Amino acid sequence: MAKLWSPICDQLGIETPIFGFAHDIATVAAISNAGGYGVYGATRRFPEEITDELATIRGLVGDKPFGVDLVLPPGMPEHNSREAIELEIPEGHKAFVQKIIEQYEIPPASGPGMRTRFIRSSEIEANQIDAVLNSPVNMFACGIGAPAPVVQAAKQRGMTTLALIGSPHHVARAIEAGVEIIVAQGYDAGAHTGPIGTYSLVPQIVEAAGDIPVLVAGGVATGQHIAAALAMGAQGVWMGTAWLLSEEHQAHMHPVNRQKLLEAGSADTVITRSESGKTFRQIRTGWSQAWEAESAPAPLKMPYQDVLVGDLLGAIEEHDIEPLIHSGAGQSVAYFNEIQPVAEIMNQLTRDTLKVLNAQQNFIKA
């Protein structure tokens, strides 16, 4: 029986070259158990939570490999001090946020939001890194930034290292840091993404990476996309949006958000900095439109934007403010319009990829 395979499968001990990024334990474990490589997004988790959650995933997947992803941007403040950040937020930005609160009559949040549980800072990053390095995880993935000392420390503990990059200019820096796998993340991708389209980006990164394996992210949703990724010289794909509508993820999904994702097309996403200060592709809603208005101030840099809007973003979901509820999602969201188990999503992707690859033989004439 034919199987979808690339050399990275043997290198990492996986059945199929599909890497799945998710923010919840059950989905990550299901991806690895279905033969792919699950990667847990832990950037907004406290170090002790990372320790416990990675141990839980290990218990769910047995000896199958899985990874963890941290965002490690340069230039963050040294200390985890919300008070210090709040003192530097301009009054005009605070007033604009207050107008949103008044317009939609949003009650206060009962506690800090996901982005204000702690401040993205060197202090928190160091503790998160220690938690990962001392956990039973197979891969350390860097979503933004790939500091060489972190990469080397992970490799010394036998972890595979990976970096997501959105420009050919970043390849040399990743290689210099010692990264072993590169994810070429195109403009189509959800959450933090760059300005270069996937088709334009991937061949350039494959060429610049040389012998280093490359995965494709951004707009990957079907077997046709996976076959195209392999044709461009990549060894696999990195998918995030695909799992948002998996059965396993629904415990973490607001019902309003679920419906918006089910109904969304590719043109219903927008890149905004209003979420965190970094470019972030999400479903277009009243939230993104408010920040696109001529009267809106320019979003602040991370972590200042985090602190400015973090509690409010939590309050929006807590109090069911329907027009403003949203989710990060890539342009591939158009392809996902039903709730399915992770295993079925994986099976369909592999079946369809093999079908496409077999059909390509029709284009070769002796």
Image: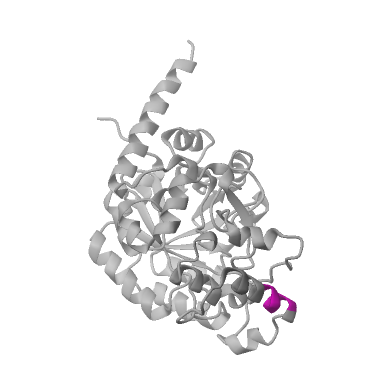
Residue 310 location in percent, x, y?
A: 55, 74
Residue 176 location in percent, x, y?
A: 60, 60
Judging depth in this view, the residue of 196 and 314 nearest the camera is 314
Judging depth in this view, the residue of 75 and 173 nearest the camera is 75
Judging depth in this view, the residue of 202 and 287 nearest the camera is 287
Does the magenta portion include 129? no
Q: Residue at x 69, y 68 (%)?
A: 299
Image quarter for residue 278?
bottom right
Residue 247 location in percent, x, y?
A: 31, 52
**Main secondary structure of the magenta stretch:** helix
Looking at the image, can residue 27 be seen? no
Q: Is residue 295 left or right of residue 348?
A: right
Quadrant location, the N terminus = top left
Does the magenta portion include 94? yes
Q: Residue at x 74, y 77 (%)?
A: 92
Q: Which region is colored magenta?
A: 92-96
**Vertical arrangement, residue 146 with respect to residue 283, above or below:** below
Image quarter for residue 290?
bottom right
